[in-house]
Amino acid sequence: MNAKEIRELFPILNQEVNGHPLVYLDSGATSQKPIQVIEAVQKYYHYDNSNVHRGVHTLGTRATDGYEGAREKVRKFIQAKSTEEIIFTRGTTTSINTVAASYAKANLSEGDEIVISYMEHHSNIIPWQQVAKETGATLKYLPLQEDGTIALSDVSATITDQTKIVSVTLVSNVLGVINPIKDIAKIAHQHGAIMVVDAAQGAPHLKIDVQDLDCDFLAFSGHKMCGPTGIGVLYGKKQLLENMEPVEFGGEMIDFVGLYESTWKELPWKFEGGTPIIAGAIGLGAAIDFLEEIGLDQIEAHEHKLAAYALERLSEVEGMKIFGPKTAANRAGIVTFNLDDVHPHDVATVLDAEGIAIRAGHHCAQPLMKWLKQSATARASFYLYNTEEDIDKLTAGLIKTKEYFSDVF
Ligand SMILES: Cc1ncc(COP(=O)(O)O)c(C=O)c1O
């Protein structure tokens, strides 16, 4: 299937916005959903809706089978050893917060270090700031090279025997950089630290094998990979999860409840207090089926091609400044830029009038904005349904934006 055929499977893309066919270049924020995912969620509510793990009735069995079946799909998708290692959460933010609130607070104390990088999303910064405040641990940052990439020599120089947690994004949501997680994990382990991976921008676009990466925890969100909002995943190595306390307490996660003491269910359910996100998990399972049918290798290659094409076409626009690596090597389908001194919100507004949706702002990465010496940037992010034609329209829209603002000032 080519991108044009794939596009046909996304009903939302078949519409006009402000009198123009929609060009959706904001998949980094959230992806659109194919008909297969929409129908899977609809089918669940239409025919199977029931609570899981409780009822002995037929609908309860169907809902439980759908929910637990989705867990197995996730396990296979990231090559985890067992479904005990797959915890359903609300998304990447909740997943990282779970590691911070449970593992980190129990295992860190004064003198310990947490290492993250300058390119992290706020969701992979603030939980660690909170851990540092509460435990007395020190938060350290991996520096970036001039092009925004991380050098392994800097990783080796920053991680010490005091480092207990290293948490880095697989793909930067601003620079599009793909980080050498496997190598960083190796260095972290040499110092006895655990490796946490923010795969929010990685899981939708790259084949992930948690055993090959040898990461200890990995977090991602369903909504960025063709799935519904409100569902995400925390992968954790079984021996770590087994020794961690739950973060949420209540129904579904207990084994026995006494008046003053209770015990927890086994993995993964001890981390899933309350009625879970059943429809979300089923929708995520359908999204994984969809992505695997097309092939993650094909998706990655397509986005890589689009990134290379976008770097080439956008460079033709006068006054264009593109952030991050100058070439598409080790880059996912994300291109962040600024156009002379036109504010990125103005750029996004003019493009919107042309039916082109991009993102403008700090992209939940204020420390990185500071490093880039920008208060905000514009970002175009691509997915399997985008085409070179979309990038041509973006380029034309940017030329129009530039002309518009030179006429005004
Ligand atoms: C790199 C990265 N990490 C974390 C997140 C947070 O994801 P969510 O809002 O789905 O929890 C995002 C979302 O944009 C992201 O791009």
Image (cartoon, helix red, strand yellow):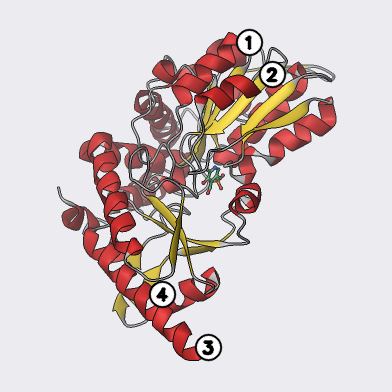
Which of discs 4 and 3 lies nearer the camera? The answer is: 3
Q: Which amino acid does label 4 sit on?
A: Leu
Which residue lies at the image location 47% right of the left edge and 16% below the top edge?
A: 214
Rate crowding at label 3 as few (under 14), some (14 to 19) or many (20 or more) other CA atoms within 10 Å.
Answer: few
**In the image, residue 166 lies at what x, y percent?**
61, 24
In the displayed structure image, the side of residue 318 where residue 304 appears, left or right? left
Q: Are marks 4 and 2 in contact (CB under 8 Å)?
A: no
Q: Earlier in the sequence, mark 4 or mark 2?
A: 2
**Among numbered discs 3 and 1, the one appearing first in the sequence:** 1
How dense is the environment of label 2, judged by Cα within 10 Å: few (below 14), some, or many (20 and up)?
many
- Residue 381 percent coordinates (x, y): 40, 55
Residue 177 rendering spot, x and y as whole percentages: 44, 41
- Which quarter of the picture shows residue 318? bottom left
Which of pointers 4 and 3 lies earlier in the amino acid sequence?
4
Q: How far from the left and from the top, in percent, is residue 327?
A: 34, 46
Residue 204, placed above or below residue 83: below
Kind of residue indicated by mark 3: Phe
Cβ atoms at labels 4 and 3 below 8 Å apart: no
Q: Name the residue under label 4.
A: 351
State which quadrant residue 391 falls in.
bottom left
In front: mark 3 or mark 1? 3
Mark sitting earlier along the chain (4/1): 1
Q: Residue at x 64, y 20 (%)?
A: 159
Q: Judge depth for marks 2 and 3 and give the one in front.
A: 3
Q: In this view, does 1 lie to the left or right of 376?
A: left
The residue that disc 3 covers is: 409
Q: Earlier in the sequence, mark 1 or mark 2?
A: 2
Circle 1 is placed at which residue position? Answer: 192
Task: Depth check: give the residue in front, 310 or 326.
Answer: 326
Task: Tell me, for residue 163, which label it has, or none.
Answer: 2
